[in-house]
Amino acid sequence: MDKCKRICGLCLGAFIALAGIAIGLGIATNGLVLGVARNPSLQDELIQLTIVFAVIPSIILFLIASFFLLFCLIKKILH
């Protein structure tokens, strides 16, 4: 039973991380749209900042969460 709780916790943590990534990207996109709407001349800089501070970390977190989900599924299948 303890193994099952650990595996379920791992899966739940990965799903929460994926949901957090989606929310974070939504907030970053909202900030980008508002920033460009207020000052269109800063569009290139704002896009670069969004990529560096939102998209790249989100991709890294997505890969980590996907790895844990895959690990969880493989562990569930094998046991």
Image (cartoon, rainbow, N blue to C red):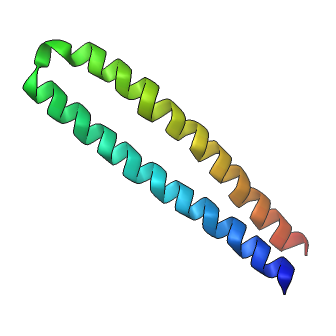
- Residue 39 location, x and y as percent? 11, 20
- Residue 69 location, x and y as percent? 69, 60
Q: From the viewer's side, name the closer residue of 78 and 65.
A: 65
Query: What residue do we see at 69% from left, 71% from top?
Result: 9
Query: What residue do we see at 31% from left, 22% from top?
Result: 47
Q: Is residue 28 left or right of residue 68?
A: left
Please determine whether, in this image, residue 58 is positioned above or below residue 72. above
Query: What residue do we see at 64% from left, 43% from top?
Result: 63
Q: From the viewer's side, name the closer residue of 74 and 60.
A: 60
Q: How many marks?
A: 0
Please determine whether, in this image, residue 43 is positioned above or below residue 76. above
Q: Is residue 65 left or right of residue 43?
A: right
Most distant residue in the left direction: 38
Please determine whether, in this image, residue 7 is positioned above or below residue 32. below
Q: Quadrant of residue 33?
A: top left
Q: Is residue 59 left or right of residue 4?
A: left
Most distant residue in the bottom direction: 1
Please determine whether, in this image, residue 65 is positioned above or below residue 47. below
Q: Is residue 9 left or right of residue 46?
A: right
The N terminus appears in which quarter of the rendering? bottom right
The C terminus appears in which quarter of the rendering? bottom right
